Image: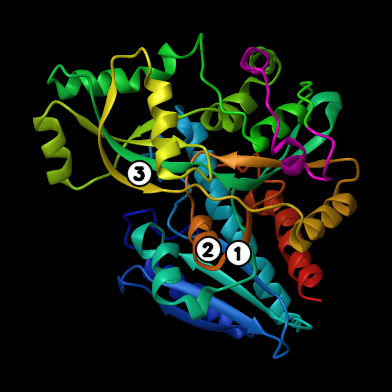
Amino acid sequence: MHRFDAPDHGTGVKELQELLAELLDEAGFTCELVGPDPTRPNLVAEIDSGVEGPSLGLLGRVDANFDKFARWHPTQYDIDDEEGQAAWAATRRAGLASQLSAAITLGRDGWRPRRGRLRLVSTSGGSGGSVWLCSNRPELVECDQLIAAEGGGGFLGSNNVHLYPLATAERGRLRIRIGDGGGDAEAVRAEVLDLKSRRKDNPILDDEPEVLALMAALGEDLSGPAEGDDPITQFGQAQIDPDALRTALAHLHAEFPDIVKLLLEPTMSVTFRPARVADEVRAAANAEGEVVVDAWVAPELNQRQAVASVERYLEGTGLRITGLVSYTVGSRSPLDTPLYKALVGWMLHADPGSELVPMLRPGPSEIHWFRATFDTIAYGFCPFMATIPTGMERVAEVLDPVVEFFKILPVRVLK
């Protein structure tokens, strides 16, 4: 996979997907290449038991080269340094590689589901990826449960407990026009980019259950209701004092600065990024002294609630919402599911004493369309992937335990 030029706007997607389809076909999978652009097809591969039962999907994106991700997404996840961006790209594509390697190995070894089916989806990303598949070829990709190769890794929390983040939800995207009444689009753009630093001393934080659960796993005392066995249920109705939340965040900044930067800060409040829109849409806004931005808001809000949360964040800044372009609701999957229990069972065997921690992603991912279209129970999870090297020297060594996880998971779920 590393040899192919397949970033978001690259030219090697078709050749790579065809090679992967050939390997999967030889291993016993039924494969199909589909998509709106024949030069950038999606690959869907399936092994069906022929017996009615659960369906498990493994999802990954093929369109991120190890060393080219930063070129296409310089602001993704607010990772400012090139090394961090490249490492994230490596993780994303290496996760798909691990899924593929596991599936091919299982097929070659003669494994077949006892019931139900295993589907592996390698998407080309963007408007031709999961959103197109779920809308135009739902019969190929529908599944009850799904694991996307993202959001994972592992790190040490308080008391040296090994924590594995499980992406259970994602923030919604409210695409809006913003202005300040001054008629200068460049000035507005600069004000929007400066919002994060202006809010640094007095942040407006969301008390979403995933955020609270992660902070609690890192040692902060943010007690939720006693009901429920999982962190989302425990913190689902929690009302945390804003000052206590800010104090806890300050403590974590000092003790776990990298975790706060990568996992907490992008998910704890409304964040803004330049919107990727048509030139005419951008020009129309700029002509009126406004800019088009994406505001990332808490999951499961209706449009009125999403707008209100952004207005609350903009209070006192001089900026205001002048128009609504579109809204994509952030989705969430519960934890009281057979798939979650299978993950916990694997974790207790592979790393006794560790914990799964629900994580809120900064924005919609490929998972979103499966939740929205099929009500799929979907998580982002790729264990052991926190330190993927950006070169090829140690990739196989680091990926071995990831491949083992993706070999064990279908056996546990489709039994």
Q: Are marks 2 and 1 in contact (CB under 8 Å)?
A: yes
In the visual, does 4 lie left or right of 108?
A: left
Circle 2 is placed at which residue position? Answer: 370
Circle 3 is placed at which residue position? Answer: 72
Q: Are marks 1 and 3 in contact (CB under 8 Å)?
A: no
Circle 1 is placed at which residue position? Answer: 376
Q: CA distance from mark 2 to mark 1?
A: 6 Å
234 versus 339 height, above or below: above
Q: Disc number at residue 285?
A: none
Q: Specify whether residue 376 is in view.
A: yes
Amino acid on which disc 1 is placed: Thr
Amino acid on which disc 3 is placed: Trp
State the SS at label 1.
Answer: loop
In the visual, does 3 lie left or right of 106?
A: left
Q: Which residues are magenta?
A: 225-246
Q: In the rendering, at what x and y percent does residue 272 appear?
A: 38, 30
In the visual, does 284 lie left or right of 233?
A: left
Q: Nearer the viewer, mark 3 or mark 2?
A: 2
Amino acid on which disc 2 is placed: Phe
